[in-house]
Amino acid sequence: MRSREPEDHQENADRWVVSYADFITLLFAFFTVMYAVSRVDSGKLGEFVGSTRGAFGSNPSASARPIIAGIVPIPPTASGLRRDADRIIAAGGADAAVTVRQAPRGLVLSMSEDVLFDAGTAYVKTSSTASLAAVAAVLKKAQCDAAVEGHTDSLPISNARYASNWELSATRATNILARLVAEYGVSPARLSAAGYAEFRPVASNTNPEGRARNRRVDVVLLLAGTGAGGTR
């Protein structure tokens, strides 16, 4: 009877081809996933994850959702959002009350004191509704972190409620942040508040017109690729 040893040996020698093919398949799947993530298209990635897990015998409904939920969208750059911000603010009838400018950290939506507050107070006026609604709409469109920053002029505060311009500017910023969250549904996880008193002016404090410009609240959209720096 003829021996089968050479044939068996040939079979064993060729088994590495199967393992190599599996490795190449997994490597292809890995780089495809990395490409999909780099494109940050959660919809297409969801379809890919579902089909890939289905092909490997997994349950896509049980395992795909956590991966998709963990993807953080890349915030838009200033060039596109500036155009959207101008359009949204104009559509809300707030273009006379909210000014838009570019700064080192991102896009600044600025509202003057007389739009938001009475002099020397931090109570938000009911007449500011259109302005705050427009700012909130821009924030929701941007889906990026934002800083709400209060500013005053250089004249010392002269009432019993606020001991300094620091307190007034910080309280104003906090109150605006609270309104954006509670009344307009902006995510609180994306917002911070700060008060800068008179120390980040946008105009001279030596005349009434300049001081009026300095009394403001800025909402700074911290956009991708804008670098660090002040809001001036």
Image (tube, helix red, strand yellow):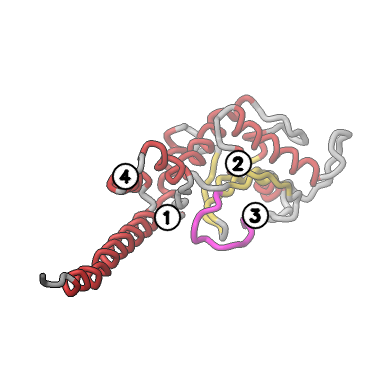
Q: Amino acid at mark 4?
A: Gly
- What is the distance, in whole Å, between disc 1 and disc 2 at their CAs? 24 Å
Please identify, in this view, whether the residue under mark 1 or under mark 4 is nearer the observer: 4
Q: Residue furthest bottom?
A: 6
Q: Secondary structure at mark 2?
A: helix
- What is the distance, in whole Å, between disc 3 and disc 1 at their CAs? 22 Å
Residue that mark 1 sits on? 79
Residue 12 in picture, x, y percent from top left: 25, 69
Residue that mark 3 sits on? 202
Residue that mark 4 sits on? 57
- What is the distance, in whole Å, between disc 2 and disc 3 at their CAs? 28 Å
Is 58 or 160 nearer to us in this picture?
Answer: 58
Q: Residue at x 78, y 50 (%)?
A: 154
Q: Quadrant of the N terminus?
A: bottom left
Q: Secondary structure at mark 3?
A: loop
> Is 230 colored magenta in this rendering?
yes
Residue that mark 2 sits on? 189
- What is the distance, in whole Å, between disc 1 and disc 4 at their CAs? 44 Å
Q: Amino acid at mark 2?
A: Ala
As displayed, is residue 50 above or below residue 14?
Answer: above
Q: Amino acid at mark 1?
A: Ser
Label located before the other in sequence (1 or 4): 4
Q: Quadrant of the C terminus?
A: bottom right
Residue 129 in picture, x, y percent from top left: 57, 28
Q: Residue furthest front?
A: 1
> Is 153 colored magenta in this rendering?
no
Total labels: the figure holds 4
Asked whether, in this view, residue 124 is left or right of residue 36, the answer is right
